[in-house]
Image (spheres, rainbow, N blue to C red):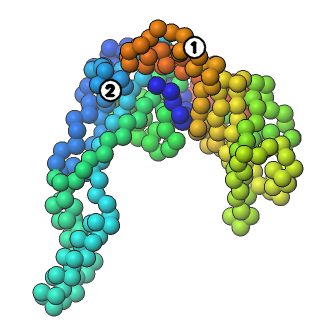
Amino acid sequence: MWFRNLQLYRLGQVFDLTPETLHDRLQAQAFQGVSRMDMATSGWVPPLGRHSELLVHATDACMMICLRKGEKLMPASVVNQLLDDRVAEIEAAEAREVYRRERRRLKDEIIVDLLPRALTRHTDLFAYIDNRNGLVVVDTPMASRAEDLISQLRATLGTFKATPLEVNESAGAAMTRWLNGAAPLPGGFELGDTCELKHPDPAGGQVTIKHQDLASSEVRNHLSHGKYAVKLALAWKERLSFVLQDDLSIKRLKFEDVIRDAEADTTADDFASRFDLDFSLMTLELAAFLPQLLESLGGEALPEAA
């Protein structure tokens, strides 16, 4: 289980539930499937899938959880075509025009009629609570999906204090200085070969640069004309590569071979053992990497109450 994207949250207090207690609490909102007449439902499922019935997978001070969302697939084009057909039938049969309010009612009736026959799509969202470092790490490229998981956890537990992690220095400003040479890259970090630059004025344009030397004059020329970095590919100690976003999210996270080799050297040959090993290796690596990333951005901006 290797995360590919990171949305980071700071715990507002020590998370004192044991894995066993957290499992019991999550069971109250375990995923029950999508009923015939529901458009979407969500609930907790075992991180190990069919290989375990536990809703929490724990290693050291980290606990992984998984939120499943089930959605009925109902393409808008299909609904709209059926609506147009029904409106045409009514207008032809009754020699009158169907107006907006009636169209909305007809559309609702079509959706209710289609629901029991619609296919269902399941998507799983993984996260782990790192109580030792006071973090929640969610594996998704979308902040809105991470918020969905945090909100569901609050609803399940009654209270769960976690806020998006913030730093003292704008990530966009720091990335811009690293690219234009105004500040050296922090120790252990190296430039990748991809960045995205944007001008504050929408008319100033936006440019994506791929597979190029980011220390080149071409990149600095864009920056000298007022653009700033919103995405930047970086590597850390030849152990991780990733794309840092100006909102502090991390995408395209890749754990390099030096880490994966540790996995290959073990005798874990069943799914559960391999999952547990991967989870341990990943959380240990991120526990070393994330503080250095935050330090490179001026350190974490802790809430005043802290």
The answer to whether residue 207 shows anywhere in this view is yes
Where's residue 193, x and y in %?
73, 42
The answer to whether residue 299 shows anywhere in this view is no
Residue at the image point whose x is 60% and y is 26% from the top: 255
Q: Is mark 2 on a helix, strand or loop?
A: helix
| Left or right: 231 in relation to 29 | right
Where's residue 208, x and y in %?
69, 53
Where's residue 9, x and y in %?
53, 31
Where's residue 243, x and y in %?
64, 39
Labels 1 and 2: the sequence-earlier one: 2
User: Which of the labelled discs sits on residue 262, or is there none?
Assistant: 1
Q: What element carries label 1?
A: helix
Q: How far apart, in angstroms, are the residues tagged by discs 1 and 2?
A: 24 Å
User: Which of the labelled discs sits on residue 142, or is there none?
Assistant: none
Q: Which amino acid does label 2 sit on?
A: Gly
Q: For marks 1 and 2, give the one nearer the viewer.
A: 1
| Left or right: 198 in relation to 182 | left
Residue at the image point whose x is 51% and y is 30% from the top: 3
Which residue is nearer to you in this view: 177 or 17?
177
Q: Which amino acid does label 1 sit on?
A: Ala
Task: Residue under label 2, please give it.
Answer: 49
